[in-house]
Image (spheres, coloured by chain):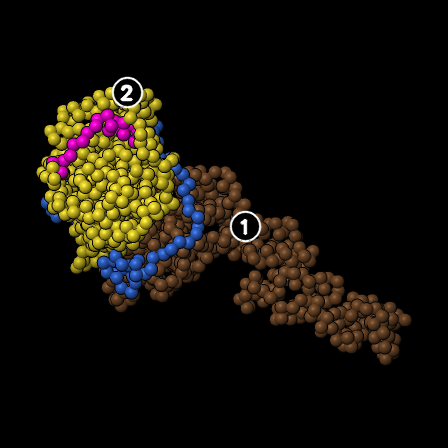
Amino acid sequence: MSGGMPPRSSMPGAGDGASGEWEVVIGLEIHVQLSTNTKMFCSCPVTFGEEPNTMVCPVCLGHPGTLPVANERAVEYATRIALALGCRIAEHTVFHRKNYFYPDLPKSYQISQFDLPLGLGGRLDVELDDGSLFPVGVTRVHMEEDAGKLVHAGGATGRIHGADYSLVDFNRGGTPLVEVVSEPDMRTPEQARAYLTQLKGLLEHLGVSDVNMEEGSLRCDANVSVRRPGAPLGVKTELKNMNSFRYVQRGLEAEIERQISALEDGETIVQATVHFDPVTGSITTLRSKEEAHDYRYFPEPDLVPIEIDEAYVERVRASVPELPAARRQRFVADYGLPAGDAGILAANRPLGDYFERVAELSGDARLSANWVTGDLSAHLNSTGVGVHESAVTPEALAGLLALLGDGTLSSKLAKDVFQVMLETGRDARAIVDERGLGQISDVVELEGIIAAIVEANPGPTEEFRQGREKVLSFFVGQVMKQTKGQANPKLLNELLRKHLAG
Amino acid sequence: MEVFSLTARACRDLLGSGEASATELVDLYLDQVERVDDRVGAFLLVDREGALAQAAAVDAKPRAERLPWEGVPIALKDLLCVEGMETTCASRILKGYRPPYDATVVAKLRAAGLVLLGKLNMDEFAMGSSTENSSVQLTHNPWDLERVPGGSSGGSAACVAAAEAPWSLGSDTGGSIRQPASLCGVVGMKPTYGAVSRYGLIAFASSLDQIGPLTRDVSDAAALLDIIAGKDPMDSTSVGLPAPIALPTRTDLTGLRFGVIREFLGEACEPGVRRVFDGAVAAIHAAGGVCDELQLPSVEKGLAAYYIIAPAEASSNLARFDGVRFGHRSEGASDLIDMYSRTRSEGFGEEVKRRIMIGTYVLSSGYYDAYYTQAQKTRTLIADDFRRAFGQVDYLISPTSPTVAFRIGERTQDPLAMYLSDLCTIPANLAGLPAISIPAGLSDGLPVGLQIVGPHFSEQGLLEAAYAVEQGLGLSDLPPIAEAAR
Amino acid sequence: MISREEVEHIARLSRLRFEEDELERLQHGLSAILDYVKTLGELDLDGLEPTAHAVDLKNVLRADEPGVCLSQAAAVANGPVVEAGQFVVPRIG
């Protein structure tokens, strides 16, 4: 291992070196574990956190004589991903063997895809913080199988280097993976992070993966190089092992900084795999192997080609939930929602579904959106409860909005009732009735109260009649005081004027 | 009972009539193993206890409740996984390996009630044509103990020839069933690629390997094929057969056309082999069949294509033997890479290493297209040639092996000479075609086999044709070891 | 004739180690075989598709339904060195 180098204390903005401008070029390779029931090529369950080597069979342990059989649902999920990224779906796709020795790779080859991947040539439009869209090309989407897990034992660090020996657990081995390879279209670590965030949201939306970086169901490698603007691409390094969004950004910043400072010091960049240590913030270059990788890809003879016809593509397309971007547009166009609300509701599939149900039941989409993105979201966020588990169902919220619409409740009271609904799970009508919270919209009742107050306050009455409009608020206050704020304000105003006018 | 006269059908009949119990049959064969195997060397493992226990269980069953083949013994090439039974591929690297599962064919044998006698010698990982590449022992040809039994299923062929089992299973990647069957004077059949599941067959070359029967006659081959064939959900490349295989009955070949592959009668073909082959052709004529010579120019390149494809797949298939999860591990390695290299260098024999090296080379960066792609295209060419030929004739015939059994040690120094043993058998593997070798006569006291090749999934017809030729030839020769045993 | 360096490179890729005299023999042995198989170059293969499988099959897929796993004891039973239900491998770095 060559020396790790801590970042300089004054980190220049990525792209700027002491000797002038550098352009950063980043491409990401994302590995997504699919949330299928079983592994890619055998029927062992896909699990996390089980006792070592208990979720294995002769096939995923690579026992001699065993053979792979591809998981139908994994192919479907991979097709969903490729379609959602706008890829061309291959009519003829083939698995290859990628040959290399490593203890977590039971067969000493990984079944992957090579020159005939499932999906080619897609694009993801990444929304940046300022709301602008930034297109990132997707080179390819292919299927493969995951490796097992190594635990490094003995030695001081518990890490690979310096460990005395390692232990291998194959529970994860054979889990279906989809690799999404981007074009080198990103120019800053922020863009890379935004791409990753957007892709994560998309995968979540597709319902094909747990997309949990900490648990490894979403993994990110980055190819990074820097160059003078307009110059040919520089030598790239592969940054591995970034298991959180923050580390992706910090790791990229550190590696870019390392490359720029090396180039400015007149050194050359060597093609290598580098690791980012989130604890020290430093980059370590793995010693370049004595021999270059030579994976000796060839078509996996134990599997047969997959041929995908138009009917299959259409079936999978139909099973793909509406994508966030399309949904946002539809919310604006069909419901007249403001872009902000539409964006929030479209980004979160269950929340968007909830909104649509409320809007349908209440018949007032804007009001529904206000409540779902406002009070409901605030509650969900503060309690960490998912919208599915919310005590207030879409039907219940629609019921509340109906009371608001017919004037039974004021906005202020509706908010209070909503809190009670969240706490008790009861419906709005029951709460209003029980607590006598409904607005007083009864003309006779209000007129009685008003008459008494007008009679008791001859002075202000006279002032009003002489044109001092301001006195009206005094009477409103008096009526509200007496009705505990339940008087229908609009009706009250009308009736007061009538009475005061004499 | 005279063990050399017994076919598997005869065993079945003895059991069915009650003339012999399953235990008596197993004892009969175990005794024969005891008597001859120190000279033949076919068995790597004799599961005396297991076989007797299985036989006792059969005997405990009322005869009316037994399955047709229940209680008939069988022995297996040592690359078929049997749960809990040491399975080594005759390699040091798998010494002590006990598979945690049964191969699909083994499960089928069990389901049919066959009794497993044990595991048979082979060339290490099925790489060889003489069984001399076994890391454990030599197997001797029952017709002449100084000669090889052929390979790689040498143990499977020799054990049937020496009547140590009524029948056996082998595997055929480039002739590994047919060539030893030919050299040992028994019937050996390689089914269409996909007819029999490969699950649990320790792979040599995945796109070429097929499991098949080695038997005393064609009818037994039909019966055993019927037991083991079938589509298997554990093998993506398996298809099964269009219909169950029936025992063949055809004796008249009228209306059938046989194509004699001219390329396999060239100078590599020994005169004695040619003489016996011509006799077989005459027998086909006599039975009413028509034989025409025809050319299949591409098949001569089969050997070259094979020695690219098979080692390439093998180099990858054998990479899993890395000392981590099973099998041999070298001790005292300083680190992981050292452990890998030592384990594999100690565990594999010379021929296996040579083929891993060739396979790695032809797949490596810069060479893939020149070798592998060319070989795959040659495969297409050969398959096309066969397809055209089957437009003109029903079956293709040739000698199975250009020579009779050679002397032990004769070809071990020259890999290319050894590879030539499979010249006539390899094209059927490349094209995935079913092929059978049946005894056609003797040349200087050594067996010569006739190979018959048919179109994909033509097994029933192929067996019928082979049966008719077998009846026409009417051979009843026994190896000298049978006389000695009398 | 393939070079000594190529033989050593292929041996490393294959995780095989050879003694000096073996390397020498391998260099000649492999060259002879490679020269022989290279005769495929004499064939006119233009326009032919490579054949990976002799029997044409496609779309062989398995339903996503869980099956039976091995017990931990059975899973590691053949392991040459095992600790705490896991396979032990020597120092990697």
The quadrant of the rendering that contains the N terminus of chain B is top left
Image coordinates of residue C89 in percent, x first then y, are 25, 59
Q: Disc 1 is attached to a residue of which chain? A: A
- Tell me which corner region of the image, top left, top right, bottom left or bottom right, holds residue B350: top left
Q: Is residue B225 left or right of residue B132?
A: right
Q: Is residue B249 visible?
A: yes
Which residue is depicted at the point 52% across and 43% down? A315
Q: Of helix, strand and loop, which one carries label 2?
A: loop
Which amino acid, by three-letter code, is at mark 1? Answer: Pro
Which chain is in brown here?
Answer: A
Q: Nearer the viewer, residue B391 or A8?
A: B391
Looking at the image, which is closer to me, A233 or B234? B234
Q: Which residues are magenta?
A: B462-482
Mark 2 neighbour class, 10 Å CA radius: few under 14, some 14 to 19, many 20 or more: some
Q: Which residue is mark 2?
A: B288
Chain B drawn colour: yellow
The residue to which callout 1 is attached is A321
Palette colour of chain C: blue
Using the image, tell me which numbered label, if any, was put on residue B169.
Answer: none
Up/down of A338 relative to B349, above or below: below
